[in-house]
Image (spheres, helix red, strand yellow):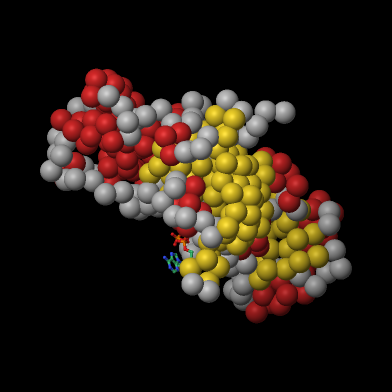
């Protein structure tokens, strides 16, 4: 078995007496794309800052392997884009990238070559001649990605790369990440499950500084999906009463309910659908929506983070 690119063991960060990252362990295989997913305040930025070498862990180990051997200084192997990158608005995109390349250790010539390559790759070939002060949020984030990749790192780490963007910028950056991930191992943090699903194959769900669920997305989807029926009824008293009594059926194992809707976890979705529909028809209940299927990853995420 090949060594994982990144191995994290018991990583912990305490600020005074407050434990913000609480002994987390995980691995990232070369070539994969992993999302560190969790609600606000879960500990994502703190974890990522430790991986990027900006914050000293209180305990635990971070090991990055290159050709199967641990490296002593992992920073040259990592590309990092912080949650709120700082750009010099008076620089052009091109000047900024060259500067970033030289800071990352490239020679002037290499930095110039890589700048052209990356400006093209992130769709800023023409804009590269303009000042960053005039860039949109999405353009800045694409420039930030180019900056993080300019020294050809083995692992790209991004802290909430799309959360501050409008839908167009978000789509642009997610599409770009989709392309990058075929060549570079990626770890990015997000509090939006949909973003993780769009790009990643692995997830690490974090809450209160602990990993509460981790693994391959498809496997988790399969393992945790449950048969559910979602029903929406009319707002009349009869329909609402029926919904309450329907949720008390013996075949319902869990209920979430609003005034005119219910999500019922059942044992056998087909059998339960037939019984519920027949009963609703016999009692002339106004069904506005009836959806029988499997619970989604969103359901699981909400259940895990308990919101
Ligand atoms: N330097 C610090 N000193 C004390 N507490 C801190 C410090 N940095 C972060 N925290 C606290 O640690 C917790 C986790 O913060 P962190 O920024 O890692 O969460 P996050 O998951 O990235 O959240 P968000 O999605 O809001 O960015 C928060 O409650 C935060 O207030």
Along the line of sight, the residue nearer the viewer: 260 or 107: 107
Horizontal side of 227 relative to 33 (left or right) equals right
Residue 90: name its quadrant: top left
Where 238 falls versus 90 (above or below)? Answer: below
228 left or right of 178 in image: right
**Image: 169 above or below 249:** above
Q: Residue 172's image quarter? A: top left
Percent position of residue 115, x then y = 27, 26
- In the picture as drawn, the residue positioned furthest to the right comes out as 250
Q: Is residue 283 visible?
A: no
Q: Quadrant of residue 218?
A: top right
Point 62% across, 67% down: residue: 306
Q: Estimate the x, y position of residue 188 in percent, counting from the top left.
A: 48, 45
Q: Position of residue 254 (x, y in %)?
A: 76, 66
Of residues 210 and 262, the one drawn nearer to the viewer in this rendering? 210
**Residue 67 visible in rendering:** yes
Q: Nearer the viewer, residue 47 or 9?
A: 9
- Looking at the rendered structure, the number of numbered marks drawn on it comes to 0
Establish if 235 lies above or below 211: below
> In the image, 216: left or right of 154?
right
Residue found at x 38% / y 32%: 149
Question: Eyeballing the image, is 262 above or below 184?
Answer: below
Tell me the quadrant of the picture where the N terminus can be found.
top right
The residue lying furthest to the front in this view is: 72
Q: Residue at x 34, y 49 (%)?
A: 165
* Image quadrant in which the C terminus is located: bottom right
Query: Residue 179: horizontal and vertical position, in percent?
Result: 45, 29
Query: In the image, 186: left or right of 259?
Result: left
Q: Residue at x 58, y 58 (%)?
A: 59
């Amino acid at each position: 078995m090949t060594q994982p690119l990144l191995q994290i063991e018991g990583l912990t960060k305490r600020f005074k007496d407050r434990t913000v990252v609480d002994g987390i362990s995980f691995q990232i295989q070369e070539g994969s794309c992993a999302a560190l997913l969790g609600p606000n305040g879960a500990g994502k930025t703190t974890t990522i800052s430790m991986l990027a070498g900006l914050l000293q862990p209180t305990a635990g180990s971070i090991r990055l392997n290159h050709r199967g051997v641990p490296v002593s200084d992992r920073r040259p192997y990592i590309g990092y884009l912080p949650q709120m990158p700082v750009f010099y608005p008076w620089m052009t995109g091109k000047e900024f990238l060259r500067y970033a390349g030289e800071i990352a250790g490239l020679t002037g010539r290499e930095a110039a070559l890589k700048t052209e390559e990356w400006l093209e790759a992130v769709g800023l070939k023409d804009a590269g001649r303009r000042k960053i002060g005039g860039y949109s949020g999405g353009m800045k984030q694409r420039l930030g990605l180019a900056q993080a990749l300019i020294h050809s790192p083995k692992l790209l780490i991004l802290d909430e790369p799309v959360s501050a963007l409008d839908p167009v910028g978000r789509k642009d950056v997610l599409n770009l990440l989709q392309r990058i991930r075929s060549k570079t191992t990626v770890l990015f943090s997000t509090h939006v499950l949909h973003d993780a699903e769009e790009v990643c194959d692995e997830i690490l769900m974090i809450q209160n500084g602990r990993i509460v669920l981790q693994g391959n997305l498809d496997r988790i989807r399969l393992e945790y999906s449950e048969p559910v029926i979602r029903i929406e009824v009319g707002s009349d008293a009869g329909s609402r009463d029926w919904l309450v009594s329907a949720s008390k059926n013996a075949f319902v194992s869990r209920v979430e309910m609003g005034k005119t809707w219910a999500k019922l976890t059942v044992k056998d979705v087909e059998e339960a659908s037939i019984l519920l529909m027949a009963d609703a028809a016999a009692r002339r209940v106004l069904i506005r929506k009836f959806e029988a299927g499997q619970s989604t990853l969103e359901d699981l995420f909400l259940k895990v983070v308990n919101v």
